[in-house]
Amino acid sequence: MESISQLLYFFPLIIVTIGSLVVMMVDAFSKDTNKLYYLSNFFLMAALIAAIADVFGPAGEAFYGMAVYGGTAAMGGVIVLLGTLFVVLLCKEYLTAIKHHVGEVYSLILFCTVGMLVLVTANDLVTLFLGVETMSIALYVLAGLIKRDKAGAEAALKYFLLGAFATGFFLYGISLLYGAAGSTNLAAIAQVTDGGILFWGGLAMLLVGIFFKISAVPFHMWTPDVYQGAPTMITAYMATASKAAMIVAVILLLGRAFPDVHSEWTEVFQVIAILTMILGNIIALVQDNMKRMLAYSSIAHVGYIMVGLAAGTAAGYSGVMYYLFAYTLMNVGAFGIVAYYERQKGLDFTNMENYGGLGFKQPMFGVAMSVFMFSLAGIPPFAGFIGKYQVFAAAVNEGLIGLVLVGVITSVIGVYYYIRVLVYLYMKEPETDQVFVEPGTVYKYTILLLAILTVYFGIQPGDLSEIFTQGFEQLQIMASSGR
């Protein structure tokens, strides 16, 4: 009876799971993909409302310590569902234009979201693995959605092979940690005081698998090719919701399983953060393809996020949560505009050089793209600036001055390639007299809403930051009571 009552704390996960099964069954008996689109949005909206309610509810453990609810887990669910909902809202028009508006896309996205929601509630290494694999298998298929496209097939194959390789490290890390702690529960692992080579070897292997999933250097090799080859809105989904889910899982892992060995793992995070920020920004400078530029940009942003993780404090983790929220808004919006330009006939609009004068052809999208680029660059008063400020401030408070200096310098370098997009939009002459297809109402207003939220949470970050801080404090209380 207790387990049944605990199900109420995982209502968003239940809603999405039911939704994925319903969409799959409806797809089997109906060829009306529009019906699946509306059904998917309905279940995602219902799950998002339930997740927001969970943010203000209690926090605790469930199912014999296999999962946690409330606090950071609930807020991670909100970020994942928000990113997924915005992607699905933009999917219909984009997939119809590229002639791949098929029903299995929606069921795969929902199944993938189930894996993400399991990830953000994981309190056991087995639960963590189940979430990672449920998410990853669906993403492998989605990456190769356009089967006749060689780039798409290559992207899916590369993602699958490297993903399987990383999974091996992940599983081996779990087995070593189990050998050191005698349990896969995060609270039990936290009680290990001298695990020796098994403990540290297990943590190292686990981190290799995690760094691959979040595309941190030097485990980033798959990211540019997969992001370029996959359908653009699927790329947006991989770059936002899946990355957010994995990083929230890392916060739970570090906060509950390794809270007392911060000084040992923080140096690894600092080195990886520096490499990721430098390489991501420098290689993005020379990219002419918009999707590859945004891919290297996403690698750079992982570096900034890892600055907050390296701080290892409540302020650092809450800053990371805010960063994930802001990053989801601005990145889905940027990819949404790229997807709109990409589906125009004539020029290859994934090539940045063909963006000449487009800011005047579609003024609303030009302004929205400016908002997203400024926010990604970390320029005030946009949400991206607040995210960077919070993770850098947390690192400064922990004495990580050198790390923050690298972050600031690479952020300045990053301004160049973001502003370069706006130079093409507004200061270059168009290559041809291109006639644009008018975006649909849902598409247009989804992009507009993303731009408004990016501005709003840059100007009014206070309440949201406080909620993220309180959420991690609840996690700390649970970790202390577990010990």
Image (spheres, helix red, strand yellow):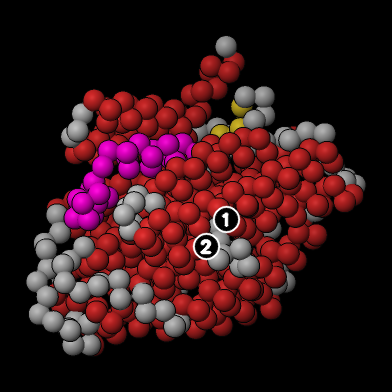
Relative horizontal placement of residue 134, taking residue 102 as reference (left or right): right
Report the residue marked by disc 1.
162
Give the residues drawn in magenta, as a range. Answer: 91-115
Q: Quadrant of the C terminus?
A: top right
**Labelled disc at residue 222:** 2
Numbered disc 1: secondary structure: helix
**Labelled disc at residue 236:** none
The image position of residue 310, as x and y in percent, is: 68, 63
Between the residue at mark 2 and the residue at mark 1, the CA separation in whole angstroms equals 7 Å
Question: For mark 1, does the 10 Å Cα neighbourhood hold few (<14), some (14 to 19), or many (20 or more) residues?
Answer: some
- Evaluate whether residue 52 shows in this view: no
Relative horizontal placement of residue 389, taking residue 67 as reference (left or right): left
Residue name at image x 85 percent, y 47 percent: 198
> Is mark 2 in CB contact (under 8 Å) with mark 1?
yes
Looking at the picture, which amino acid does disc 2 mark? Trp
Looking at the picture, which amino acid does disc 1 mark? Leu
Residue 345 occupies which quadrant of the picture?
Answer: bottom left
Q: Earlier in the sequence, mark 2 or mark 1?
A: 1
Relative horizontal placement of residue 145, taking residue 59 as reference (left or right): left
Q: Main secondary structure of the magenta part?
A: helix
Eyeballing the image, is 339 above or below 280? above
Numbered disc 2: secondary structure: loop
